Image (spheres, coloured by chain):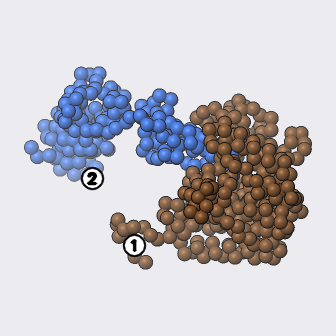
Amino acid sequence: MTKPAAGALDWRPCATPRILRLRAELLGRVRAFFSERGLLEVDTPLLTAVPCPDPNVAPVRLAPLRADSEHAYYLQSSPESPMKRLLAAGSGPIYQIAHAFRNDERGRLHQPEFSLLEWYRPGFDHHALMDEVADLLRVMLGADTHERVSFAEAFERRLGLDPHKAGPDELGRVACDNGLRLARPADEAVYLDFLMSHCIAPHLGSPYPTLLFYYPISHCAYARIREADPPLAERFEVFVAGIELGNGYHELSDPVVQRMRFMAENAKRRRSGLPEVPLDERLLAALECGMPECAGVAIGFDRLVMIAAGAKSLEDVIAFPFGKL
Amino acid sequence: MASYSTNQFKAGLKVLLEGDPCSVLENEFVKPGKGQAFNRIKLRNLKTNRVIERTYKSGETLEGADVVDREFQYLYSDGELWHFMDPQTYEQVAAGKGAMNDAAPWLKGQEACVLTLWNGEPLAVSPPTFVILAITSTDPGVRGDTASGGSKPATLETGAVVKVPLFVENGEVIKIDTRTGEYVSRVKE
């Protein structure tokens, strides 16, 4: 291959042929893994009429579609909603490798367009699904073992504080003690995200994967809440080599609670000056009809390839990353 | 001055942080799986030259700082301030010791310097990369001593002291690289 002349348009892929082959190999292993376990591969639309209500997920909104210019359409930020509708319709266990879109995320570990590996397991809780995530990492990364640490233990070990009790002042002070400063004051939830992403996560997942579980209810998203003191979200995340690789829940299936969560997200949006989003009524109707008790998880597939390849940036494992479109 | 959102922070962008002009060095996007996204920013305070690290919630803004680099001609020093003139507009500015940094010993007058200005006030003065100055005092070299690395101190007309090869004599004019403070060559008048 000859080097492009100076000033020539850079049309070549970013990922090397070796990495593209590894990517294909890993895709094959994912399909073999799930097919062996009897999960059905599904393929739901990238288009959606209901953007994710989470104020921290910025949707990609499309120009009006001529097929239906009355309604706004978006590119999905995850295939969660249609997959849950399939579950409610009796699909049984399902998985999907889907592209997902988040408008303003770009960095070494973020691309506005990325690939998710998402699957749902009727009859599983978060513990059973964590077992399966560990099995998958064995097949994909050769990780023979893993550790399981609760959210509280991780904070206790690294920072010596109880994340379920500490207020914003204490959290801010601990950040300061660790040489970190948030430029402007924030609430507890933001401080927990700050400490997690800056102080704790970089140390998780080495030498073997870490499954972190039982999140504060401020971070429950769409997870069930375990009645305990304090109540805890039945949510987990998986970390490898300091990188957050995926997020799973013992899924909420109560339509009333789900509606309240959506409305709470809209209330947060109002407070941050963001427009409210329409509720996902089709998903709520599916839950109304009855979605089986299940656990689900989404793994960042590009990040998985990046770790398997020993690459430093997502741009190295995507043929044409953002910026080279 | 315009405001900039964290996702517009690129290396070299000048912003105001706690009232001081700063230059963005690095901007890392950090986000937990779910939850608040952050931008971890490294900046250099252009007044103190210190590197600072701050984390912002993504989307927060900082005000831009009016920092520009412009070429000025050095005029003279009154002992406390160094005076410069814009050769196009004849506008004059004065730089204090802090802004002069290591530039002062290389300037005798009329050199073209790049001044970094914040709201019109000099923050930093960069001398020309090469200056030509006369030697006002140096010991006579020992003839025949050509051992490599043989050098001696020489005082220049501005008061700066540089190392010169032994064959360079008092009264000669030399070229100096201001980045390293090293002798480059003799200059024939």
Q: Which chain is brown?
A: A
Q: Amino acid at mark 1?
A: Lys
Colour of chain B, in one word, is blue
**Front in this rendered view, residue A152 or B184:** A152
Q: Is residue A30 above or below residue B165?
A: below
Question: What crowding class fits label 2: few (fewer than 14 Cα within 10 Å), some (14-19), or many (20 or more)?
Answer: few
Q: Looking at the rendering, in which quadrant would you find the N terminus of chain B? A: top left
Q: Is residue A42 above or below residue A221?
A: below
Q: Which residue is mark 2?
A: B148
Q: Is residue A204 above or below residue A309?
A: above
Determine if residue A103 is in view: yes
**Front in this rendered view, residue A124 or A199:** A124
**Front in this rendered view, residue A310 or A17:** A17
As helix, strand or loop, the secondary structure at mark 2 comes to loop
**Mark sitting on residue A3:** 1
Residue B72 appears at what percent x and percent y?
24, 35
**Front in this rendered view, residue A51 or A139:** A51
Q: Amino acid at mark 2?
A: Ser
Residue B136 appears at what percent x and percent y?
17, 33
Residue at image coords 27%, 33%: B105
* Same chain assignment for discs 2 and 1: no
Residue at image coords 80%, 44%: A260
